[in-house]
Amino acid sequence: MTLNIQSQVLLATRNTLRLPTRAEYLVDVDSDAEILEALRYARQRRWPVTVLGGGSNTVFAQDLVGLVICIRTRGIELIDERVIAAAGESWDHLVRHTIEAGLSGLENLTLIPGLVGAAPIQNIGAYGVELAGVVEAVHAIDIATEETLVLSNLDCQFGYRDSIFKRALHQRVIITQVCLRLNHSFVPQLDYLDLQRWRALQSPENVTAKQVSAVVADIRRKKLPDPAIVGNVGSFFKNPQIDADAWRQLQQDFPGLTGREQVDGSWKLSAAWLIDSLGLKGFKVGDAAVSDQHALVLINKGKATSQDVLALARQVQQQVMSRFNLQLEIEPVIIP
Ligand SMILES: Cc1cc2nc3c(=O)[nH]c(=O)nc-3n(C[C@H](O)[C@H](O)[C@H](O)COP(=O)(O)OP(=O)(O)OC[C@H]3O[C@@H](n4cnc5c(N)ncnc54)[C@H](O)[C@@H]3O)c2cc1C
């Protein structure tokens, strides 16, 4: 047996919210063979399994029973415009690597924390681009049967911060590899207001993927609290999506409300605006608070517990519900 299984491991440095949760058992795996070995080891002992990447989209509700499998597999292969990346690679490293290789498609997704294997789970997105637009296939291992699965882009059932991995396959598979199709030719995607403002200052023929990546990184550093300094999991709530009639009514009732029209005619509202307009920036429960920097981000001021964070999230949801009659949906995965 090659696995190094540790017991009673504090997870504070393995989740970006820095919750002081404990894992009953934990193993770092750096090959698919080790993933299979860890699954067998857990099954023989009837231990439940929890999969963890960079811990940047996870909220532990309590100490974890059973085995936490931390994915540390590495490897990036570029074949013309195809990219095959192991689940344990850093997402941002992959973005930079592909841009250096002259490929475009990931530049708007620069600086999203976490690992490649988690990216399809919530179909990561930023600045008008979603992972779904470049995924060719996702390779995974079925936790119960150890079978290898290959899911096409359609099989993944991608939606807004959503995929089959958050629904039918939730906690049922371990993603091992993600295959992407990128482009040697560069088509800038600059629909977002911040990027449009930047573009207005450039001569269009000079815009490169590397520049867009640098601008996105710059905007993100200014807008979002850095998890290396203050614990957080990025946006804590999804932007609510409503139909055009509801949007018109809300706009009348709340002038200043911001939203974006979607291709299907629905409207995506800014959850940050809803929370900010309630004056909730800085609002605290225990040591968890709504960030002063960005109303959509809940932060750990130092000693926050899972209970603090979840109670704060509930209070924000209740206040948004009673003022706007809108249900805010939590974005990160809550591990019960
Ligand atoms: C400051 C900050 C900014 C952020 N900005 C964005 C943003 O702009 N856009 C965006 O979409 N997200 C954003 N996020 C959220 C987060 O970075 C992404 O969701 C990221 O993909 C999570 O990766 P991770 O490896 O940390 O996942 P983890 O938190 O480790 O895991 C998330 C979920 O995926 C499961 N999982 C992880 N790896 C695997 C695997 N290999 N196989 C099966 N299941 C697995 C876990 O069990 C868990 O349920 C941000 C987070 C932070 C802290």
Image (cartoon, helix red, strand yellow):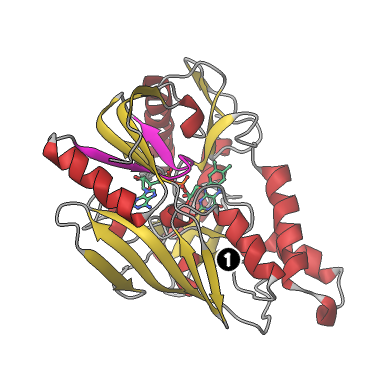
Range of residues picked out in magenta: 48-60
Residue in the foreground of this view, choosing between 294 and 71: 71
The N terminus, quarter of image: top left
Q: Is residue 51 magenta?
A: yes
Q: Quadrant of residue 42?
A: top left
Q: Is residue 296 magenta?
A: no
In the image, is residue 82 above or below residue 106?
A: below
Q: Quadrant of residue 265?
A: bottom left
The residue shown at (53%, 70%) is 77
Name, please, the residue furthest toward the front: 1
Task: Answer few, some or many: residues within 10 Å of disc 1's Cα (few below 14, many 20 plus, some between 14 and 19).
Answer: few
Residue bearing the label numbered 1: 128
Q: Position of residue 144 (x, y in %)?
A: 15, 52
Residue in the foreground of this view, choosing between 27 and 184: 27
**What amino acid type is highlighted by mark number 1?**
Gly
Element type at marker 1? Answer: loop
Q: Is residue 336 visible?
A: no
Residue in the foreground of this view, choosing between 22 and 119: 22
Q: Is residue 245 left or right of residue 169?
A: right
Q: How many marks?
A: 1
The residue shown at (79%, 75%) is 207
Q: Position of residue 291 (x, y in %)?
A: 59, 31
In the image, is residue 301 above or below residue 245?
A: above
Q: Position of residue 179 (x, y in %)?
A: 44, 71
Q: Quadrant of residue 25?
A: top left
The residue shown at (53%, 65%) is 76
